[in-house]
Amino acid sequence: MFFQTLDILGTIAFAISGVLVAMNKRMDPFGVLIIAFVTAVGGGTLRDVMVGVEPVSWMQNMTFVYVIIGSAVFAVVFRNFLKHLRRSLFLFDTIGIGLYTVVGIETGLVANLHPIICIALGTMTACFGGVLRDILCNEIPVIFRKEVYATACIIGGLTYFILRRFLEDQNYLFIVAGLVVIIIRLLAVRFKISLPSLYRTDGQTKDN
């Protein structure tokens, strides 16, 4: 039950982030809804396809469809309020990757996958919906920039497996690992921490 709650909360966060991007691009209501769906279920769909879940989870459970539609309507109705929240898109996106990282890892464990594969699966679950959202909205995906994004998911995944040896309560394990992702992402943006670039300011590689 707790695991499904995390999945739903992640769906809400990503759906709202998708709506905010779509409205910034001045899309019509249909476009806004499509971007909300793609952002919310893109990572989960890739995850389920890779572990062989047929049909994918959101197609088996209409709760996710209703949640996405409800979140999209909420974001549209209260768009003026959300605009007043500083970095609201960043906030919902960060919450989404934290929650979906844990969901992806747990799905991998249920499928009896190696911990490294589980971390990769959690990272893809968290990031792929945002990649699709940005591509469809003609933006360079955050994961392909210097920002600490996928790195936060990987560290959260490592934390999950380290603490798994010490925490018996799985719910606390989910919460701590998800918070690690969120906190790392927040701190990276707050203190402008980014990954090193392979290029100099003149556009050539540093080896040249």
Image: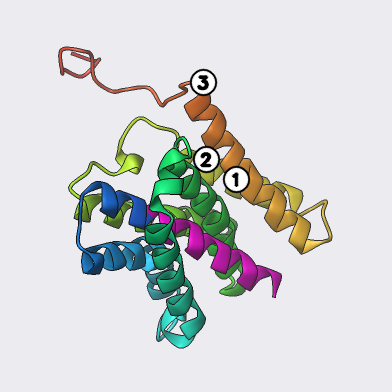
Judge by depth and name the residue closer to the eye, 60 or 163: 60
Up the image or down, 151 lies above or below 25; here it is above
Q: Position of residue 84 (x, y in %)?
A: 45, 39
- Which quarter of the figure has residue 51? bottom left
Label 3 vs 1, first from the N-terminus = 1
- What kind of secondary structure does the magenta stretch mostly adopt? helix
Indicate yes or no whether the magenta region holds residue 53. no
Instruction: Give the residue type at disc 1.
Output: Gly
- On screen, residue 180 above or below 168: above
Quadrant (top left, top right, bottom left, bottom right) of the C terminus: top left
Disc 1: CA contacts within 10 A as few (<14), some (14-19) or many (>=20): many
Give the secondary structure at mark 2: helix
Query: Which residue is pictured at 23% across the width and 69% down the height?
Result: 30
Residue bearing the label numbered 1: 156
Location of residue 65 in the rendering, given as x and y in whole percent from the top left corner: 43, 78
Q: Which mark is residue 152?
A: 2
